[in-house]
Each structure stands twice: as structure tokens, then as C-alpha cells.
Image (cartoon, rainbow, N blue to C red):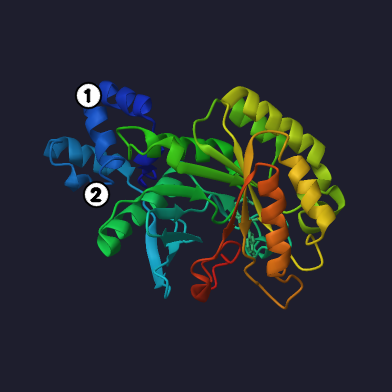
């Protein structure tokens, strides 16, 4: 008889593991021990679980596997940024990035293989969406970067941003489960205040985040506060225009009392006029917010070009005059295609 396919033990919750151990006549606390090995200690092999008896380990081995991602290729940028091509258990590849600054080490991680949204300035949008990542595949990217942070910089990982490949709010359950594991003491024990989820802004899902009273930070890729302009660069805006996004953000603020960060690229001839700035200032008044003006990372033939310094300065001065914090963010890791919007499995 052919052996039944082994299950991935990391798909089981602590409750399910507990049920399993009780059912095989073992102690309930065994589940907690195994769970810690799987998540807190990232064990890749049952034989690492030295406080579990040999016979129990053998039984686990006969029924389960431990799936893990593997860093397939690592590239280092001149500015210290590291880009990982990460192989998932079915051979698919996503990318994750370690971004070092003086004060922080940030992990930028992916939530989907490819992306289904067609933002036409983003390299990932050129890849078809293949599938969602499981919670463990998201979590493992963080662990891999945490290890690299200690190995190469001798510093701890301080921040996590869901700004890699994919739209995190279209993989809601797995993203939230991964964040739970990242923040829980029997996971990585990181503070949710150090985690930022970045989204194109799907109103229904932003309201769901609010209802779930999440404690992490929310960033919305805005790029324009004028419907026609935003729809031209982000087709999602046709389905969910700015009015709906604004309503969802009001609900977010009402429930969580957390402000939102808008990510915004200024392109020559697209959103670099005074009317664009004024529309953004107005949109920023809907709820408490700040703006990150991100440098554009060219991805192809030059359909989009970074706007002039004058245009950026106009944004900064008008936002600041209205009492809104605005920062210009210079790109990191451009030489290895690791910057925002450049992740496209090219390596
Ligand atoms: N889907 C999510 C997260 C991935 S994109 C989102 O859209 O927010 C992470 C950030 O990079 C977003 O703000 C996105 O608008 C920005 N981005 C995409 N392509 C870019 C490019 N070529 N140059 C600069 N920023 C880009």
C-alpha cells in the first residue's frame, strides 16, 4: 500500500497540535513544546527537538513533514541592502529585502507570488498572480532576515514592512496569522508597532482591519488624490474610488485611533502640479496622517519619470504648512533591483 502523503505540521494551530497529542495518548503540554520548536526556534528537523522523546519524534516523522522556505539566492547592494530570492516549498519564488539604516534594520516581505493588481508603474504587476503565501511562508521570510541581520550587521531586526510582492489585503487571513506569530511571545515577540502593512487601499478590507482592531501600522499607496489621475496609474481606483477609500479610513481611525501613512510617488507630468498637491493636502485632512514621498524607481522604458526637485519641494512645503508631516524617502538597493516596485524575480 502506498504511504499516505505526510501533512505539514506547521499548518496545525496550537489547539490542533494539542488535540493531536491528547489523541495519541501523550500529554497536552507536548504540543506547546513542539509548537515552540516549530515557531520560536524555527526547527527544520524533528531531531532538533531534543526535549521530545525519541519515540515521539519517530512517530511525528512518520506522519508529518516540516515545510520551510529556503533562501535560494542572496544579493548585496553597495548600500548594504540585501535581496533574497526565496524558494517556497512548491518551487515558486518570491523576493524579500533587508534594508539597513543607521537606526533600523527593516525586513520588507512578500505576501503573494506575483500580484493581481495592475499598478502600471510597478514591476511586480508584470508578473501574474500565482498564489497566496501561507502564514508560515510569510513568517519564515522574517526569520531569514532576522538571522541575516544578526549575521551580517550584528544588530537585531527592528521593523517589518509588508511592501514586497503582492497585495497583503488580498491574502488577509494568512497575513494576519503571520503577524500574530511574529508578535506572540511564543513566536518572535516583536511589537506590532514595528510592523507596517502597505496596501493599494481596498476599502472593504481596511474596514475589516478596523473591526479586527489590529495593532500594527497601516500604509496606503495613494499616488494621487484626484480620481482620474489615480485611476490612470492604479486601475483598482476605478472599482474603489477615493471617496470610498476616505470613508474606510475614517472608519479605521474611529476604531483604532491610529493614523495612516500615505505612500506617494511624484511623476513628471502626471501628478506634479499645484492642483495635485492641493488635492493631497485636502485628502490628508480626512484622518490624521503623514506622507512618505517615495523616489520613483524606474522599471522600464521611461513611461514614468521622477518629477523635479521643485515639484517635490512644493509637496513638502504645502503639506508642512497644513501641519502634515511629509518625508522624502530615497530608495535603497536600486543597483540590485531591490527597491520599491522593482521586485520581479529577475535577479
Ligand atoms: N501592494 C502593496 C504593497 C506592495 S508595493 C501596496 O501597493 O501598497 C510597496 C510600495 O512600493 C507601494 O507604495 C507601491 O506603490 C510602491 N511602488 C511600486 N512600484 C514602485 C516604483 N516603481 N517606484 C517606487 N515605488 C513603487
Name the residue: 57% across, 61% down. 340
- Residue 29: assigned label: 1
Q: Quadrant of residue 251?
A: top right
Per the image, the residue denoted by label 2 is: 45
- Sequence-wise, the earlier of marks 1 and 2 is 1
Residue 36, percent from left and from top: 26, 36
The alpha-carbon separation of the residues under discs 1 and 2 comes to 20 Å
Along the line of sight, which residue is nearer the eye, 196 or 110? 196
Label 1 beta carbon less than 8 Å to ligand 1:
no
- Residue 223, x across and y down, in percent: 72, 54
Badge 2 marks a residue whose secondary structure is loop
SS state under label 1: helix
Q: Is residue 165 placed above or below 42 in the rendered structure?
A: below
Ligand 1 sits in quadrant: bottom right
What residue is rendered at 37% in x and 27% in y?
16
Say few, some or many: other residues with alpha carbon within 10 Å of mark 1 (under 14 / 14 to 19 / 20 or more): few
Amino acid at each position: 500500500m502506498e504511504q499516505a502523503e505526510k501533512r505539514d505540521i506547521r499548518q496545525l494551530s496550537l489547539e490542533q497540535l494539542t488535540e493531536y497529542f491528547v489523541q495519541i495518548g501523550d500529554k497536552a503540554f507536548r504540543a506547546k513544546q513542539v509548537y515552540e520548536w516549530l515557531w520560536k526556534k524555527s526547527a527544520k528537523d524533528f531531531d532538533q527537538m531534543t526535549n521530545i522523546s525519541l519515540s515521539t519524534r519517530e512517530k511525528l516523522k512518520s506522519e508529518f513533514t516540516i515545510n520551510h522556505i529556503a533562501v535560494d539566492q542572496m544579493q548585496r547592494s553597495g548600500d548594504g541592502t540585501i535581496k533574497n530570492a526565496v524558494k517556497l516549498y512548491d518551487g515558486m519564488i518570491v523576493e524579500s529585502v533587508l534594508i539597513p539604516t543607521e537606526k533600523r534594520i527593516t525586513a520588507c516581505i512578500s505576501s503573494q507570488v506575483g500580484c493581481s493588481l495592475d499598478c502600471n508603474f510597478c514591476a511586480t504587476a508584470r508578473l501574474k498572480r500565482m498564489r497566496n503565501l501561507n502564514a508560515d511562508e510569510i513568517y519564515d521570510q522574517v526569520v531569514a532576515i532576522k538571522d541575516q541581520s544578526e549575521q551580517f550587521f550584528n544588530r537585531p531586526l527592528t521593523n517589518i514592512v509588508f511592501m514586497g510582492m503582492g497585495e497583503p489585503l488580498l491574502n488577509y487571513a494568512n497575513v494576519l496569522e503571520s503577524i500574530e506569530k511574529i508578535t506572540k511571545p511564543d513566536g518572535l515577540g516583536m511589537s506590532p508597532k514595528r510592523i507596517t502593512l502597505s496596501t493599494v487601499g481596498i476599502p472593504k478590507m481596511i474596514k475589516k482591519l478596523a473591526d479586527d482592531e489590529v495593532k500594527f501600522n497601516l500604509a496606503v499607496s495613494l499616488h494621487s488624490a484626484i480620481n482620474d489621475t489615480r485611476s490612470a496609474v492604479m486601475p483598482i481606483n476605478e472599482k474603489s474610488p477615493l471617496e470610498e477609500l476616505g470613508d474606510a479610513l475614517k472608519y479605521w481611525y474611529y476604531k483604532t485611533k491610529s493614523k495612516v501613512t500615505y505612500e506617494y510617488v511624484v511623476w513628471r507630468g502626471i501628478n506634479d502640479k499645484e492642483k495635485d498637491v492641493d488635492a493631497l493636502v485636502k485628502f490628508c485632512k480626512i484622518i490624521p496622517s503623514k506622507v512618505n514621498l517615495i523616489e520613483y524607481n524606474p522599471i522600464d522604458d521611461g513611461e514614468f519619470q521622477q518629477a523635479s526637485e521643485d515639484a517635490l519641494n512644493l509637496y513638502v512645503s504645502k503639506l508642512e504648512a497644513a501641519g502634515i508631516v511629509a518625508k522624502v524617502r530615497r530608495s535603497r538597493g536600486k543597483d540590485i533591483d531591490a527597491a520599491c516596485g522593482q521586485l520581479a524575480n529577475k535577479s
